[in-house]
Amino acid sequence: MSSNVKSFVLWSIATFLFFEFAVDGWGKLNGEGMNSLIGWGYSCSLIGIIGFFEMVSASGLLFPKIRKLAAFFIVTLTLMSTYIHIVQQDVLGLLINVMNIGLAAMVLWYSSERSHVPLN
């Protein structure tokens, strides 16, 4: 894969994840969309903390020097969210989390120095 295509794919995925996690994090901080989490028994302060970390991690995806760390935090947050969706038997949320883990793993891979398979 040429470096231009690799760069385009990386920025496309990072931008998609940025918007997804920034909007979701802002919603948690703003109090919108917390009904299901509160209904499942999670505290408002925990939801706010998660929203804050989602926004910080999403913002980190836009800076190449910290992109790998941000993608790692997104994978960590999404794994915790996956557990919640499994416990609550929320299949749609679980599928979205699996997709996000895959996309964040692609960001980690394409941000790596070894993002190609050597031919020899």
Image (cartoon, rainbow, N blue to C red):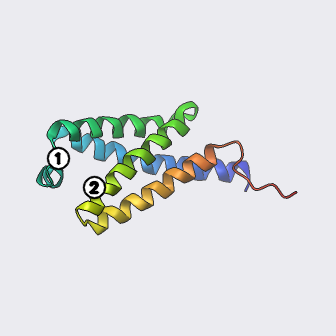
Helix, strand or loop for disc 1:
loop
Can see residue 7? yes
Quarter of the image with the N terminus is: bottom right
Distance between the alpha carbons at the discs numbered 1 and 2: 10 Å
The residue beneath circle 1 is 42
Can see residue 18? no
Residue furthest right as drawn:
120
Using the image as rendered, state which of residue 64 and residue 106 is in the foreground. 106
Using the image as rendered, state which of residue 87 and residue 9 is in the foreground. 87
In this picture, residue 56 sits left or right of residue 11: left
Helix, strand or loop for disc 2:
helix
Q: Residue at x 25, y 61 (%)?
A: 87
> Relative to 85, is 112 above or below?
above
Q: Residue at x 41, y 38 (%)?
A: 57
In this picture, residue 47 sits left or right of residue 112: left
Image coordinates for residue 24, horizontal then vertical, percent? 29, 47
Q: Amino acid at mark 2?
A: Ile
Q: Residue at x 72, y 48 (%)?
A: 3
* Structural crowding at the residue carrying mark 1, measured as other residues with C-alpha within 10 Å and reported as few (<14), some (14–19) or many (≥20): few
Image coordinates for residue 99, horizontal then vertical, percent? 44, 61
The residue beneath circle 2 is 84
Checking the image for residue 117, the label placed there is none
In this picture, residue 44 sits left or right of residue 18: left
* Structural crowding at the residue carrying mark 2, measured as other residues with C-alpha within 10 Å and reported as few (<14), some (14–19) or many (≥20): some
The reply to whether dot 1 and dot 2 touch (C-beta < 8 Å) is: yes
Image coordinates for residue 47, horizontal then vertical, percent? 22, 41
Q: Amino acid at mark 1?
A: Tyr
The number of callouts visible is 2
